[in-house]
């Protein structure tokens, strides 16, 4: 290898070096540190050198003596399930509608994308006012249409609190799915639809045999984004219920923060973060494998 | 090319060294006192006082506001880690966390300064306010005995009632309920008149803990309360079941406003100020808040009605905001001098009038707004968990307060909650033992 070639390779690596350094500094180094902290009993205040090494004790505690953590995990799964079914279902319906040459399609696109750009805290405060048990709009409407017996403190009732949070999350998030799905639909060549029409395929057959197979990669993307985004729900919980009543709307992020802030157990919070990260990784991996199988079929 | 390579090297070095751990650099400089705080309502008053102090002494004082409180708390922790705490700061946490800051060498022991001139400075404060910041000999946190912060103001948390709504419900606004039976009766009368009962920030957990502690003192006395924290008495004990029953009684007798378990205190304050609830459980800071929301609000202040005659009712209170001095400050003497000035009679009276908070300096009491006087009367009944030499595990506090929320929503009985809290307590005690 000549000097010239070596120099070329060196320069190529040099160009990548800033990105590698930034990645190592802001991603890899913190990640490795999080894992290191998770092995220590540390409050994040005293010098780390005086923290006590506890090995995998935090992980053992999470798996054997922390029911609230798994309860919060179930809540996140429940909201994710609602979101996957209803939010993405609605997003697909609206995307299909806007994909056709309907009047005012642009305006609809803009309107549908409005909720996602709003701050979670602001959205939470608005919906808190709607759900309010004393002077809320929802109770007011229910009373006006003769369903006053259904009026309640929606966010303080354990039977409705989590679903109410899920509804707000779906309202806020369906715009993302809508935009991605619409982009996917618009990338399908129109000739395929025309060919299907010539072959005598109806609307349902066209959707099933043309749209769905070509949209699988987009469905996978939307599903993964929905799962990752919903499992990490936090701002809406804080502004709507604070995790209450009791533990009924606690989610993994609120539990991690409770350990970090309330209990000042930074080591334990890091262990929770790692467990949570691994769960998300496994879910995403399973999802990708399942979609690969579906694509092959 | 050489210029480009130089740029890359500089960028790379900056990205690495920019995140290096602290090298002991201190925010304090030799000619300026820097104070970090979270009190948005006092920002203007602090700025004015700093200007006044500069005119008097020539010393620059810079108040820096960081809000909200969560962000402030994280900033303080980060600054402690990198040893960049300012000359003056406050810690918004319980004694267990404060003790970590002290043991890490971030907080100056103020006792020697308090003791100067025959304890002149110490004598100006309410003893109960100072006690919140005092670590006694043999404390469980293993902190050297001393006073580690100066109270800027004092507060207490009580029940506040709307006199007009009381009258509307047929209750005597000049004689609010004093015992449990009268209190429950008031709840039912308010409900019959279509008026919401009590509002409070019980979605924020710590305010539930506050009322639960009040009744724990009233039902079992301080010694048994401390014994429970030490693990020598059980949460499954009948006295604790009675404490939890207090909340069931309040629920059953319509004393609690709809949705109180997820209510944040700001919302509770709005409801009370707008006359949508007859009772509020709130701190003395509410005078300022209510005044801003509804200056014509006609309210009175009362101690939580007693449940038992065995022990006196105690309310949470003591120091409101406390300021600490960085042990690494290069301006310790100047900072102490400023804090002495800030907590002197005139400045305290100015702060009390400007921000409607109770002054920590007893000598300023004659000059406080009338609305605050109702809170001053009950300073003798004040106590605070920080005054104890022991502190409860955060997980137990959470289990206790979330359990109370479950009682209020009718999901669990007081007995069930008592057993659950005790189970968490046993688990935490075991973990503590294993750590030792």
Image (cartoon, coloured by chain):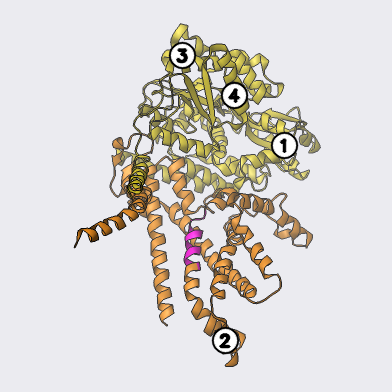
Chain colours: A orange, B yellow
Q: Are marks 4 and 3 in contact (CB under 8 Å)?
A: no
**Pointer 3 and pointer 1 on the same chain:** yes
**Pointer 4 and pointer 3 on the same chain:** yes
- Tell me the residue that label 4 is attached to: B47
Q: Earlier in the sequence, mark 4 or mark 3?
A: 4
Marks 2 and 1 sit apart, C-alpha to C-alpha, by: 61 Å
In this view, the mark in front (4 or 3) = 4
- Tell me the residue that label 2 is attached to: A205
In this view, the mark in front (4 or 1) = 4
Q: Are marks 3 and 1 in contact (CB under 8 Å)?
A: no
Residue placed furthest toward the left: A1
**As displayed, is residue B296 above or below residue A147?**
above
* Label 2: few (<14), some (14–19) or many (≥20) C-alpha neighbours in 10 Å: few
Q: Are marks 4 and 1 in contact (CB under 8 Å)?
A: no
**As displayed, is residue B118 above or below residue B54?**
above
Q: Residue at position x 48%, y 43% from top?
A: B398
* Label 4: few (<14), some (14–19) or many (≥20) C-alpha neighbours in 10 Å: some
Marks 3 and 1 sit apart, C-alpha to C-alpha, by: 40 Å
* Label 1: few (<14), some (14–19) or many (≥20) C-alpha neighbours in 10 Å: many
Marks 4 and 1 sit apart, C-alpha to C-alpha, by: 29 Å
Numbered tag placed on residue B107 in the rendering: none
**As displayed, is residue A111 above or below residue B193?**
below
- Residue B118 coordinates in the image, percent (x, y): 46, 6
Q: Chain of mark 1?
A: B
Q: Residue at position x 26%, y 56% from top?
A: A10
Q: Earlier in the sequence, mark 3 or mark 1?
A: 3
- Tell me the residue that label 3 is attached to: B114
């Amino acid at each position: 290898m000549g000097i010239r070639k070596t120099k070329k390779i060196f320069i190529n690596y040099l160009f990548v070096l800033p990105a590698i350094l930034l990645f190592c500094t802001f991603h890899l180094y913190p990640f490795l540190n999080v894992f290191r902290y998770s092995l220590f009993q540390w409050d994040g205040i005293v010098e780390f050198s005086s923290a006590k090494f506890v090995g995998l004790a935090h992980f053992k505690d999470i798996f054997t003596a922390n029911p609230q953590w798994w309860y919060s995990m179930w809540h996140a799964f429940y909201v994710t399930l609602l979101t996957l079914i209803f939010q993405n279902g609605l997003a697909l319906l609206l995307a299909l509608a806007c994909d056709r040459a309907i009047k005012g399609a642009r305006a609809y696109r803009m309107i549908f994308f409005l909720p996602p750009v709003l701050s979670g805290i602001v959205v939470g405060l608005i919906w808190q006012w709607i759900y309010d048990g004393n002077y809320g709009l929802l109770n007011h409407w229910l009373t006006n249409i003769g369903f006053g017996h259904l009026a309640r403190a929606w966010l303080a009732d354990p039977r409705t609190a989590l679903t109410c949070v899920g509804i707000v999350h779906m309202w806020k998030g369906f715009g993302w799915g809508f935009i991605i799905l619409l982009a996917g639909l618009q990338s399908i060549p129109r000739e395929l639809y025309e060919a299907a029409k010539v072959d005598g395929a109806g609307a349902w057959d066209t959707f099933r045999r043309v749209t769905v197979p070509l949209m699988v990669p987009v469905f996978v993307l939307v599903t993964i984004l929905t799962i990752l985004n919903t499992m990490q729900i936090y701002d809406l919980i804080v502004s709507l219920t604070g995790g209450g009543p009791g533990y009924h709307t606690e989610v993994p992020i609120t539990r991690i923060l409770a350990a970090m802030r309330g209990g000042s157990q930074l080591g334990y919070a890091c262990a929770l973060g790692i467990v949570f990260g691994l769960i998300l990784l496994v879910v995403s991996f399973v999802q990708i494998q399942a979609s690969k199988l579906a694509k092959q079929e | 090319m050489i210029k480009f390579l130089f740029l890359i090297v500089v960028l790379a070095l900056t990205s690495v060294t920019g995140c290096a751990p602290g090298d002991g650099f201190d925010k304090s400089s030799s000619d300026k006192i820097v104070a970090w705080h979270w009190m948005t309502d006092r920002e203007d008053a602090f700025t004015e006082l700093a200007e006044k102090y500069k005119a008097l002494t020539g010393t620059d004082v810079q108040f820096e506001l960081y809000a909200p409180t969560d962000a402030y708390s994280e900033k303080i922790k980060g600054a402690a880690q990198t040893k960049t705490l300012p000359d003056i700061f406050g810690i918004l946490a319980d004694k267990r966390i404060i003790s970590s800051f002290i043991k890490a060498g971030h907080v100056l022991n103020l006792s020697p300064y308090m003791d100067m001139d025959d304890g002149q400075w110490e004598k100006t404060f309410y003893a109960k306010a100072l006690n919140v910041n005092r670590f006694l000999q043999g404390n469980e946190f293993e902190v050297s005995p001393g006073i580690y912060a100066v109270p800027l103001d004092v507060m207490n948390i009580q029940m506040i009632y709307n006199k007009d709504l009381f009258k509307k419900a047929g209750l005597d606004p000049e004689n609010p309920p004093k015992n449990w039976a009268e209190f429950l009766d008031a709840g039912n009368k308010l409900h019959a008149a279509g008026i919401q009962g009590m509002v409070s920030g019980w979605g924020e957990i710590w305010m539930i803990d506050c009322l639960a502690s009040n009744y724990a003192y009233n039902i079992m006395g301080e010694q048994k309360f401390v014994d429970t924290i030490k693990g020598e008495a059980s949460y499954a004990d009948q006295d604790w079941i009675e404490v939890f029953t207090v909340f069931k009684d309040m629920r059953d007798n319509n004393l609690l406003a709809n949705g109180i378990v997820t209510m944040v205190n700001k919302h509770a304050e709005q409801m009370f100020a707008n006359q949508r609830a007859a009772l509020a459980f709130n701190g003395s800071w509410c005078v300022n808040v209510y005044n801003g929301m509804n200056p014509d609000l006609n309210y009175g202040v009362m101690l939580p009605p007693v449940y038992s005659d065995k022990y006196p009712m105690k309310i949470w209170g003591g120091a409101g905001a406390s300021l600490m001095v960085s042990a690494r400050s290069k301006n310790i003497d100047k900072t102490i001098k400023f804090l002495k000035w800030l907590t002197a009679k005139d400045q305290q009276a100015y702060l009390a009038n400007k921000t409607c908070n109770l002054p920590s300096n007893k000598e300023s009491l004659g000059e406080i707004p009338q609305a605050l006087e109702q809170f001053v009367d009950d300073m003798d009944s004040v106590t605070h968990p920080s005054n104890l030499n022991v502190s409860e595990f955060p997980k137990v506090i959470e289990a206790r307060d979330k359990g109370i929320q479950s009682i209020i929503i009718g999901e669990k009985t007081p007995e069930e909650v008592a057993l659950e809290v005790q189970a968490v307590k046993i688990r935490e005690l075991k973990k503590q033992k294993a750590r030792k």
